[in-house]
Image (spheres, rainbow, N blue to C red):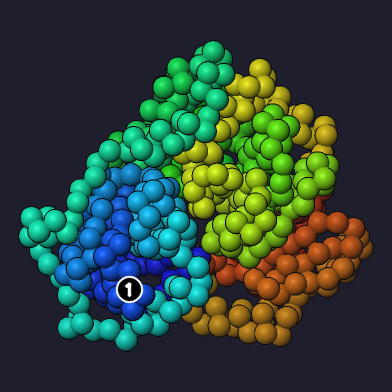
Amino acid sequence: MIQFGTGGWRAIIGDGFTKANVRLLIQGLCDRMASEQVTQRGVVVGFDRRFLSQEAAEWACEVFAGNGVPVTYIGRPAPTPMFMWTVRNKQTPYGIAVTASHNPALYNGIKVFTEGGRDAEAEVTQELMDHINTLTDDDVLELRFDTAVEEGLITTQTSLNWYLDAILDKLDVETIRHRHLHIVLDPMFGVAQTSLQTILMTARCQVDVINERHDTLFGGRMPSPSRGTLEHLRQTVLDRDADLGIATDGDADRLGIIDDTGTFLHPNQILVLLYEYLLTGKGWTGPAVRNMSTTHLLDRVAEAHGEQCHEVPVGFKWISAKMAETDAVIGGESSGGLTVRGHIAGKDGIYAGSLLVEMVAASGKKLSELWADIVERYGQLEMVEKAYTFTPERRAELQERVFVDQDLPDFAEVHGSWGVDHVTWDDGAKIYFTEGGWATIRFSGTEPVLRVFAEMEHLEDAEAVAATIADHLGLEG
């Protein structure tokens, strides 16, 4: 069975991620395009640096071609946001990226984009999934890649410059140019190097790059920019006295930052910093959008400027939709993805990193000083994130216990000020405490884990709230 999550379809290579399943998924998408009578408008196909990504992209092209769908094939590993931008730019009704984003190296997958370069909404992926799982190998139509090229059904594009120029057009390059910033870039063995290095060097930054080689094992680490995976970047920033370090995940849609003091800035902090900059530094107006497990400090910034912060379920498709509905300035999530009004309707680590550099350059301050300014004005909230693995049997038990029986801890027994004000069940469970702070419990849509988030005024309280949930549910990991 092909199952879509919040970030597309992902599966273990050689188990669920196979040539047969890739072909079935693409045939299902071709059938959908035929039913919508959009076949001739074409599709965009791209891939990252993971094992089998290029091969799978070419398998996809062959099925699209076999169904008479013209393909714009990005014939080099490139950032996922570049594919989304190309879907929008070429006005194709669909596009795909072969990637498993930040998942471990043994995974691969496919993200599906819809018109305008958006992540496919849940209704689309559910309908697609239901249809795909009725197909057999005999239903798949295909045309050999070289034959499809000869017949003009596959057009290969290798230039990234349209996408890079679109980002440069949005930046205050002149201001960056005269700050002479020194930046260390860590693409985490993924696809960000060419794009980010080109943008930053165009703006006359000094750029040092680490972890740039092609390594399908991602150096033995998770290709996800987090405090635990960016020690090499942190040390390099300190050793070279750089102004900041920028890391992106495997397909460059997520961002991680090390400041001038070697401190890891959580994606929550980056989101708050950029929203404040867009409102005060660039004079923009409008609300912000965050998912249910992202910092409420963003709400404080919005309120201080007479704006609103909208909360949506986890999954960037919800953020994109709410941004379009409300004309929001920025939208993001605590896992490191964000986007800004006027760019693609999906997360983009290339643009976010570039905009952060502009913010530092325009301020005349160090990044650490900018965060200190935020804390002085809005205070500080501390977040704890935990992930727990489970067996299939344990998942069923947790599903029943938490989300059917709604069995939650008595937090007030542990700490009197943690009385529960109310709980929402729209996407997992979100618990709001009477004295402020919150916690969420939900199954991941991209990995087989149960995630627990807690945000409180003090780190020890956030840790204790998360531990209370884990103890009550018998979670380990």
Q: Please name the residue shown 50% across and 38% down the image.
A: 351
Q: Please name the residue shown 14% across and 56% down the image.
A: 152
Q: Nearer the viewer, residue 405 or 416?
A: 405
Q: Please name the residue shown 32% across and 86% down the image.
A: 134
Res 318 quadrant in image: bottom right
* Side (left or right) of 17 relative to 85: left
Q: From the viewer's perspective, is residue 195 above or below residue 1?
A: above
Q: Residue 47, image x and y in percent?
A: 30, 52
Q: Residue 287, image x and y in percent?
A: 72, 49
Q: Residue 458, image x and y in percent?
A: 80, 47
Res 219 quadrant in image: top left
Q: What element carries label 1?
A: loop
Of the 4 image quadrants, the one containing the C terminus is: bottom right
Q: Which of 441 and 115 is in front in this view?
A: 115
Q: Residue 450, image x and y in percent?
A: 58, 68
Res 468 quadrant in image: bottom right
Marks counted in the figure total: 1
Q: According to the image, label 1 marks what residue?
A: 37
Q: Please name the residue shown 39% across and 39% down the image.
A: 163
Q: From the viewer's perspective, is residue 217 above or below residue 239?
A: below
Judge the density around disc 1: few (<14), some (14-19), many (≥20) Cα neighbours within 10 Å: few
Q: Nearer the viewer, residue 214 or 164?
A: 164
Of the 4 image quadrants, the one containing the N terminus is: bottom left
Q: Which of 230 and 110 is in front in this view?
A: 110
Judge whether residue 221 can be spotted in this image.
no
Q: From the viewer's perspective, is residue 191 above or below residue 428?
A: above
Judge whether residue 196 can be spotted in this image.
yes
Q: What residue type is labelled 1?
A: Gln
